[in-house]
Image (cartoon, rainbow, N blue to C red):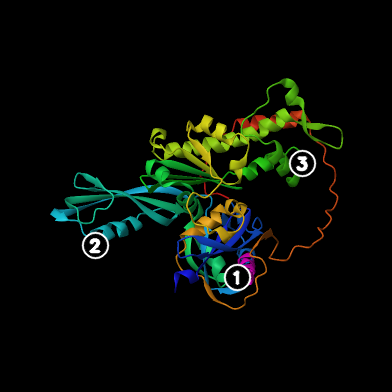
């Protein structure tokens, strides 16, 4: 098939939303985005893991149909991007004597790869294998084929997770009768796209602050060196604020408006200022609010710092510094808090795509920024995902509205039922919550739901 007819379709499975995106690969290598749709996923995805097969399959079918309507083409297969609680790296070394000074063959390398896959990973499954280096005789090389040596030792990084993570994805798409062209780890795809070539070569860590999870990915010498997914995200901050007798929408609004990763309050008087007034006349002060937000962000960042330490790569070796992305990276003072806790001073927030993968006709730039994860999966796709065009009608390719089950949103919003007024428990409760969070700093990469 000609390059100009190469349509790629990707679906990213997130804890907040499932995003579908379609793009046409152009002769110059850019991608002209043709359709973007999104539907909420909290009813069937938790911390990146599908837990309701029926609802997830319905969502996938809905996204597929909506993209087909935009493209006027039938979708035959899709690329799937995923992440999830429990994904982490383990390393494995395998040695093999060669019986004398001989050139290392491709067959020998493949035997080492097969031996690595036989490693006992307990109740986990291997999602991907990244060769780290080879010791051919006394020489460390990245490509051992053809090197003359009497012994070879391979070092592999195995990315593992509970079997249910991948199995549930496969079952979901089988239920939706949609073929998977390839499964990709979204945090890794994001790192490949958002990091510059220099950053990947010199050493850089990408931190994706998601809703339910925070992902840590490290590249060095253009090789993926470490990945871990922490089961904490920006939604935890919202839930903490909700504990102050606020509903989710109010808590999210306050987080966006006043939330800061570091406490900026300069005076006692400023700390007493209200960020929210309750119906009974009491209020949530800026001081208590700031302590709650800062405590949870500190917990997340402490875990990020620990994962960087566990990777075995010294901070001094991360010459490229850190790249922050995801919804949580937009929080005020996130760079200052990140630097203070991790000790990494060279930090930037990924607000644009460093790789040239978009045609000028793709649409407004905010589409690119908001859907970085889905676009990174799209960028890696190589196989055509669509059939021939069946209509010339185009109903507007950019319409990333969020709907339940793919239904067209009503023009008039349904009136929300009046909720019973909730009275705050008083400063004592807020202070106890803040104190409790301040004491949290345990490293967590567990698989438990």
Among the 4 quarters of the image, the one containing residue 128 = bottom left
Q: Is residue 134 magenta?
A: no
Image vertical order of residue 177 relative to residue 229, above or below? below
Gap in angstroms between the C-alphas marked 3 and 2: 62 Å
Q: Quadrant of the N terminus?
A: bottom left
Q: Residue lying at the far left in this picture: please name it.
A: 100
Q: Is residue 69 magenta?
A: yes
Q: Is residue 44 visible?
A: yes
Q: Nearer the viewer, mark 2 or mark 1?
A: 1
Q: What is the secondary structure assignment of the residue under circle 1?
A: helix
Q: Position of residue 167 (x, y in %)?
A: 51, 62
Residue at image x 74%, y 24%?
270
Dot label at residue 46: none
Residue at image x 48%, y 30%?
343
Q: Please tell me how crowded label 3 is: few (under 14), some (14-19), or many (20+) other residues with Cα within 10 Å.
A: many
Q: What is the secondary structure assignment of the residue under circle 2?
A: helix
Q: Position of residue 195 (x, y in %)?
A: 46, 46
Dot label at residue 71: 1
> Considering only order in the chain, which callout, 1 or 2, is on the residue closer to the N terminus?
1
Q: Which residue is mark 3?
A: 246
Residue at image x 53%, y 29%?
340
Gap in angstroms between the C-alphas marked 3 and 1: 42 Å
Magenta segment? 58-70
Q: How many marks?
A: 3
> Considering only order in the chain, which callout, 2 or 3, is on the residue closer to the N terminus?
2
> Considering only order in the chain, which callout, 1 or 3, is on the residue closer to the N terminus?
1
Q: Is residue 442 visible?
A: no
Image vertical order of residue 2 relative to residue 162, above or below? below
Q: Position of residue 123 (x, y in %)?
A: 45, 54
């Amino acid at each position: 098939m000609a390059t100009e007819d190469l349509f790629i379709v990707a679906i990213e499975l997130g804890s907040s939303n499932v995003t579908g995106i379609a793009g046409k690969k152009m002769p110059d290598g850019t991608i002209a985005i043709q359709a973007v749709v999104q539907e909420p996923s909290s009813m069937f995805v938790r911390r990146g893991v599908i837990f309701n097969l029926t609802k997830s399959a319905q969502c996938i079918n809905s996204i597929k149909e909506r993209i087909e309507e935009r493209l006027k083409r039938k979708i035959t297969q899709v690329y799937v991007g995923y992440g999830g609680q429990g994904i982490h790296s383990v390393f494995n070394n395998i040695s093999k004597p060669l019986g004398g000074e001989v050139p290392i063959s491709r067959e020998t390398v493949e035997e080492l790869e097969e031996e690595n896959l036989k490693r006992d990973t307990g109740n986990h499954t291997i999602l991907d294998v990244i060769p780290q280096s080879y010791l051919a005789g006394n020489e460390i090389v990245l490509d051992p084929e053809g090197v003359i040596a009497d012994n070879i030792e391979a070092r592999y990084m195995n990315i593992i997770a509970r079997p249910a993570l991948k199995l549930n994805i496969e079952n979901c798409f089988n239920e939706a009768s949609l073929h998977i062209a390839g499964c990709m780890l979204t945090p890794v795809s994001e790192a490949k796209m958002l990091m510059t070539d220099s950053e990947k070569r010199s050493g850089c860590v990408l931190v994706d602050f998601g809703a339910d999870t925070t992902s840590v990915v490290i590249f060095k010498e253009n090789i993926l060196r470490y990945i871990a997914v922490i089961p904490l995200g920006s939604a935890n901050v919202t839930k903490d604020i909700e504990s102050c007798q606020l509903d989710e929408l109010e808590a999210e609004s306050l987080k966006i408006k006043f939330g800061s990763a570091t406490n900026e309050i300069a005076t006692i008087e400023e700390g007493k200022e209200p960020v929210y007034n309750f119906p009974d006349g009491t209020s949530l002060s800026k001081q208590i609010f700031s302590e709650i937000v800062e405590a949870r962000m500190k917990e997340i960042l402490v875990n990020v710092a620990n994962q960087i330490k566990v990777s075995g790569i010294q901070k001094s070796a991360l010459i490229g510094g850190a790249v922050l992305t995801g919804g949580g990276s937009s929080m005020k003072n996130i760079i200052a808090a990140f630097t203070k806790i991790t000790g990494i001073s060279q930090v930037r927030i990924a607000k644009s795509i460093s790789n040239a993968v978009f045609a000028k006709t793709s649409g407004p730039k905010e589409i690119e920024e908001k859907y970085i994860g889905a676009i990174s999966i799209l960028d890696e796709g190589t196989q055509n995902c669509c059939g021939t065009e069946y209509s010339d009608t185009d109903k507007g390719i950019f319409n990333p509205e969020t709907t339940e089950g793919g239904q067209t949103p009503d023009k008039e919003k349904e009136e929300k039922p009046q909720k019973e007024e909730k009275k705050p428990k008083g400063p004592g409760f807020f202070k106890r919550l803040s104190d409790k969070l301040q004491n949290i700093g345990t490293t967590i990469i567990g698989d438990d739901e």
